[in-house]
Amino acid sequence: MMWGKTVRTLWKVGLWLALVGVLAACAVPAPEAPAAEAPAAEAPAAEAPAEEGTGEVVKVALLLPGPVTDGGWSQLAYAGLEALSTDPGFETAYAESVSQANIPSVTRGYADDGFDLIIGHGFEFGSAFLEIAPEYPEIHFFATTFQPQPEIPANTQYVDAAYFPAAYAAGALAALLSESKVVGFVGGGDNPTQQGMMKLFIAGAEQTVEGAKGLGVVTGDYNDAAKGREAATTMIGNGADVIWHAADVTGLGAIEGAVASGAQVLGAYSDQISLAPDNLGASLVMDLAQMVQTKAQEVRDGSFAGGIEWRPSVDEMWHWAAGEGNSYNSAVISEEIWTQFVPIWDELSSGSLDVSALLQ
Amino acid sequence: MELSQIFTAAFVVTWLAAALGLAGPVLLASLGEIFGERSGVLNIGIEGTMLLGALASFLVTFYTGSPWLGLTGALATGVLVALLLAWMYVTVRASQVVVGIVFNTLALGLASYGYRLAMGGQTQVQKIPMFGPVYLPGLSDLPALGPILFEHSVMFYLTAALVLAAGYLLYRTRFGLNLRAVGENPRAADTAGISVVRMRYAGVLFSGATAGMAGAYLVLAQLGIFRDNIIAGRGFIALAIVIFGRWNPYLAAAAAVIFGIADALQLSLQIFQLDLPAQLLLSLPYLLTILAMSGLLGRSLSPTALMTPYTKD
């Protein structure tokens, strides 16, 4: 009797587990099985060989730390891959929500399948590629993160994505926009990049407008929207009237916190105007789609350089946007303020304003 | 920096208002969980239930434009999901811990798949209409107290009312007495003619209902968006609050506010760039929970039959 029940219970729990497995597989394509995506069916030349270049199809794999629907970091890079997939010269594949523990097996899986370029989109891939890349000298690796150590494999490229000049620019624009002369930054994970961005945002605000004050909170989490909201309202309660965030989902909450408190806000990574059409001045959009396409093209034409840290200027990696075709939202930012801001952005882009010393 | 420079009126008001904002959803989830645990069922699945409630409230509001319908959808989803969980916990008598944990994983898969099915192809983050702050004439204008207590959304006041209702139901009604009896000594309760199965189903359904609404609280009163990770562990914090609040709705309210105060304090203190690790402040409420469990702060009174499936024969 007792045994019968135990067996019945185990059987039911087993069924649950199987169901979970099936659903998890539906939600997140299994990273261990890198099935190449077919090129879009609408492309008329989909079955023809590549028209230019070497004539061979370049196989590009994109490994993402989050889902392709995250509305930010992963989704932006995925958009670049999607654009590539319409080009018959490329064959693309991706794995989303790749956990830290799965990085080696997923990366080796694509490498063994003969992909030409493997892009690891996030700091998680930085040190993993140091170990894996030398095993596959014929394959190109690109990790969207700072070079983790002075010695890096000859087939691997890292990127200094101009986070710090971008944060300085956001601080400058926020301070120009502020009436109370107090501006606030909401950060995500507690790591050196986020801490540095907070520092540069504050410096940008305080150096641009005399008497301005920058506040900052690093929430410790990229994915806690409710905490982002409270971080923003806390700074607004302490005098801030313009908020900028650099924190994915936590940042979405920060935008809502600013809206609820009647403050103004600047977006980050993607164009976030739809979240706050009346309060959002502009979003500092990261051109990750362009980055993915550029690296793939470089592999195709043979110009991809390994063993280096790519250092694009801030305007190569970022641009300001507020809806289709606009750099800023004129309902929030006046033309006068924007005119004051543009020279700062230009100086940061040309390198004549070097903010790297402010990190020390 | 002098303490008096930090603890200004604006600082304290902002801090406490943020504390209540953070406390609200977890308190709402913990209220129902108290009923579940008082009946003898530890429903760990509330994290997943909150997520499904959040998704339901988002989708219903997205398609109908009404946050009230969204809240109803979340409540219905919570109850439906709890029915399934109660069947596993009470009828099948499966391990409550295993079922709860497995269910949370299932809920994550379901929610992320469901959101993608409904919203796939949208490149922009979709926002829905929300409950705005309720203006209470007289009260909202009070200095200090107004911004702290009386500028919240309807969900906050609903939660406060539910604390009183839960306390009344648990301690002043026959239903509450029966529910507690089943959680303390199911055999004795059964002998006295109380249906253990029915009481435990009721307890789990209550926990599902408030967990679903707690998910809706985040979506409809605080964020206006849905993401897979929107709950961010709040279900587990609610479980800690139940213990810290000693399975009592009033004490749970106090516990949730203490959690909120500690959480909001680390956000507030960062503004002043003190050399104080934020993690230390964050760990405080959990430390208090461990102390509460250890008996150092008085005897902990967990329901005796908690996590023990009941067999009639």
Image (cartoon, rainbow, N blue to C red):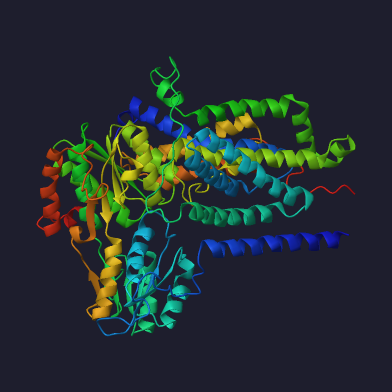
Q: Is residue B161 left or right of residue A316?
A: right
Q: Is residue B42 left or right of residue A115?
A: right
Decide which of A133, A335 is in the foreground and name it: A335
Q: Position of residue A154 (x, y in %)?
A: 28, 80
Residue B74 visible to the viewer: yes
Q: Quadrant of residue A328?
A: top left
Q: Quadrant of the C terminus of chain A?
A: bottom left
Q: Is residue B6 left or right of residue B127?
A: left
Decide which of B226, A325 is in the foreground and name it: A325
Give the answer, above or below, for where A247 lies relative to B255.
below
Residue positioned most to the top: B138
Give the answer, above or below, for where A302 lies relative to A328.
below
Tally of numbered tags: 0
At 53% from the left edge and 39% from the top edge, which residue is drawn? B216
Residue B277 visible to the viewer: no
At 62% from the left edge and 40% from the top edge, which residue is drawn? B76
Q: Position of residue B199 (x, y in %)?
A: 77, 38
Decide which of A330, B263 is in the foreground and name it: A330
Q: Position of residue B65 (x, y in %)?
A: 47, 37
Q: Quadrant of residue A49?
A: bottom left
Give the answer, above or below, for where A103 lies relative to B48.
below
Give the answer, above or below, for where A359 lies relative to B207.
below
Q: Position of residue B98 (x, y in %)?
A: 67, 56
Residue positioned most to the front: A44
Q: Is residue B279 left or right of residue A272?
A: right
At 29% from the left edge and 71% from the top edge, which residue is drawn? A149
Q: Quadrant of the N terminus of chain A?
A: bottom right
Q: Quadrant of residue B293?
A: top right
